[in-house]
Image (cartoon, coloured by chain):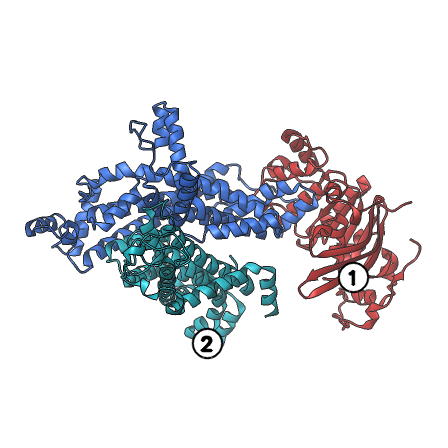
Chain colours: A red, B cyan, C blue
Amino acid sequence: MMPLLDIKNLELSFNSYKGLTQVLHGIDLNIKKGERVALVGESGSGKSVTARLVLGLLQEARNAKASGEVLFDGSDVNQMKNKDRAGLRGTDISMIFQDPTSSLNPSFTIETQFHDVLKRRTPDLTKEMSFERACALLDDVAIPDPKRVLKSYNFQMSGGMNQRIMIAMALANKPKLLLADEPGTALDVTVQSQTLQLMRDLVSENDTAVLLISHNLGVVREFADRLYVIYRGRIVEEGPTALIFNNPQHAYTKALLSAIPRITGGGLPQIAEQTDDYLAPKITHGAI
Amino acid sequence: MIRAFHILKSNPLSLVGMILVLTITLCAVFAPLIAPFPDHNGAVVEFLNANKAPSAQNWMGTDLVGRDIFSRIIYAYQISLVLGVVVLAISTPIGTVVGLIAGYKGGWIETVLMRITDVFLSVPPLVLAIAMMGVLEPTLTNAMLAVTAMWWPWYARLVYNIARSEREEGYVLAAEVIGASSNHITFREILPNCLPAIITKMTLDMGFVIIIASSLSFLGLGVQPPTPDLGSMVAEGARYLPDSWWLSVFPGLAILLAVFGFNLLGDGLREILGVEE
Amino acid sequence: MTVAISRPPSPDNKPFGNFMSSILRLLWQRLVISVVVLIGVSMLIFVIARIIPGDPARIALGPNATAEQISNLRADLHLDEPIITQYGFFVADLFRGDLGISLYTNRPVTLDIAQFLPATLELVLIAGIFMVMIGLPLGVLSARFQNKWPDHLIRVISLVTVSAPSFVWAVIFMLLFAFYLPLFPIAGRLSDLYEIDRITGFLFIDTLIAGNFAAFGDAVRHIVLPALALALSGIGQAARLTRANMVETYKKPYIEMAQAYGFFPSRIANHYAFKPSLIPSLTIIGLDFAAMFGNAFLVEAVFAWPGLSRYGVAVILRKDLNAIMGTVLIIALAFVVVNIIVDLIIAFLNPRIRYSEKAKP
């Protein structure tokens, strides 16, 4: 079965007065329909820019140069015209961000923002129709009294509420692919866990594929079927989640996994910040 | 430094600004050497040559009593720059000290100082200047006094804002913990962090002072003839529009050029020094 | 610690009630400061006028005054009493609505003000409208096309407009658009052809009341150049300010989200980025608008506009103390009122103020 998202040899460089800095050194990644894949790495590894390249946001930036193929549903995002790229956003591909409260505009009600989101699929939607539909969507994410919430502003509500609103917005247009950039990082742990549960239920309902970007291995383990480990712009290990967690092979993955504090104590081990071992070639696990 | 160079390169206008400012400063400093008719800055009359359009001999024409306008503009630049430097040299230290003290000490000192500042800031600059000059005799010294008196509050507010936010920063708390004196903290710790904003503002203010001063003399409330001043030159010529257009247009453009130069330079400095707008 | 299923916002279904209470608080603060400002400014001018060397009465009456005239005037103005007493007289008269007689027009100052104030108000108002309607959109365009040619062009033009005082622009406009290209009249408020009854003093209103549309059009033509000259530097400021704020707003996460959802760039620019940027700009735009009261002095002089500023300059040059105090006071009052109105508008537009229990600007 052809993958929904197929990234082949993706490279990205940024241009600044210091010169050309290469950020991605040939990423290969694929996601099938309905699959939940995680991209795991530390800050600055290049995971966030990969997501933005899938969305088609970075290709338009003046100082960014991307090469390689990002095939979504067969078409290469890198080669598309700006208009076509924009057409995908908010409809077939959607994204949720790290901090739900600051991702919502403080000058407009939730209702207005929902209206704009829903108009992406149906441009001639009326305010009344979108209000009704938004109420239904908020119901799906277990928000009580959706009417009042719709009339409110982001700063009047808690992080958990805003997170649910974001999820509702992201799934409103039944996207084929959902990009989740460190979801729940800005929330406390219990809220985060409930959020993930909610996300899992909703995406499996609609067969939505998910690319989860995270540095939080606990979240990844709960949520993803497969994972890719990225280090300094290169994929160093990939495979089914369970396999990798039970038997990490690459030096970097091993270091990552051992850096999790355990409830049994023992503190954090000493890990090399950078060694040549981390630059070892990619290891692929099991049957994919 | 490399960053500064790169910013200048991507923003060539700042370079233009720097060149303009340098040119004008040179004109002002070396006025007697540059002006074709150096004695025309005084009470000279040459009625035969009065009110002549721009020509090879008088590049910007002559005024109503025959003086070369180009030369007078150069001398007028001298006056403008002197005024600007004096006003800033006095008002900046005063305003900075007031702002630092109010920002760091807090308490009733802060309230009193900033309320006084607020009163000055509530009045549009030109109105206050006009009101003050209206009751003083119109001389260069009085004009400098009036403008200085209404200028320092702007620096007070600028520095106060910075000082107040810096007050909570780690390095201030650290200094307090080791027992540094208030004086030391305000002047040796906080002040350096205010400098980029102050320097940028001073550069932009040179232009603004020129605007206020020329406005005052345009109304007859500033420098008086025969001292050459850009504002009064425009005023003199305004009655003779459109026929003797050069009487007003060239001094007006001279103002524009000078202020534009300072604004460009100030904007460039702001980018280089990383000051917020 | 928040539970996942949290309650929707607490009793905020009375947004108007909250709005009113925070507004009243703001108004009160504003009022207090304004009163202090007025008192401060009036005292400052009052004192300076009387402590300068020279006899104000003699200066006002000119070199040909007789000793008797001078001493009469001195008695009238209470110039021989201590300053406190003089100020006391001033305040007492003020409360009776008496600002004294102007030596320039030989009429009560209040009458002079009533005659000339509307012209200035009309000019400043139209200039303010220009500032907002031209400056803000230019700033939005500039930010939307950041670092492309529209941005560079608008930035240069904005910088040029703030680099010259209003009288320079007034002279240039007059030369270009009244003399060389006779598109607009040269000076004044209305052609002598039209005789309009003075009801409010605002030509825009009076001509319509009289039903004289030709006169209305004429009044409009007369106000365009002066208002534009007055507004020009404000337009540049507004454009620069809006651009700067919008550039900052574009970096915010909620704009990235809007882009991630594929909202049209025009919708993002004109609404999602503009509205949050507008609020911090408003205070300064308000200040720029108030500053126009000052620049009106310059523009009225060039265009021979019969307004309060022109009157003000005339009485200042003649050292007409009563008229000076009256003019200064009224202009100070005018921009205090303007500031209050601007604060109200800001409070209304800012949802955080509308919906919060304590007023935070």
Q: Is residue B198 visible?
A: no
Viewer-side residue, B145 vs B187: B145
Q: Quadrant of residue C96?
A: top left
Give the percent coordinates (x, y) of residue C58: 13, 53
- Farthest-out residue, right: A287
The percent position of residue B75, horizontal first and vertical second, equals 36, 63
Residue at left offset 11%, top offset 55%: C80
Q: Is residue C267 left or right of residue A199?
A: left
Cα–Cα span, label 2 and label 1: 47 Å
Which residue lies under the disc numbered 2? B180
Percent x, y of residue C85: 15, 53
> SS for tag 2?
loop
Task: Count residues near mark 2 (Cα–Cα under 10 Å), then give few for <14, some for 14-19, many for 20+.
Answer: few
Please identify the quarter of the rendering in which residue A220 is found: bottom right
Residue B122 position (above or below residue B196)? above
Q: Quadrant of the N terminus of chain A?
A: top right
Is A287 left, or right, of B179 in this rendering?
right
Would residue C201 be found to the left or right of residue A139 on screen? left
Give me the chain letter of mark 2. Answer: B
Q: Is A220 drawn above or below residue C188 in the view shown?
A: below
**Residue type marked 2:** Ala
Q: C106 above or below B19? A: above
Indicate whether B57 appears above or below B127: below
Residue B109 bears which disc, if any? none
Nearer-the-camera pick, B78 or A34? B78
> Is residue A63 at least partly visible in the picture?
yes
Mark carried by residue A233: 1
Is label 2 or label 1 in front? Answer: 1
The three-letter amino acid code for the residue at tag 1 is Gly
Q: Are marks 2 and 1 on the same chain?
A: no
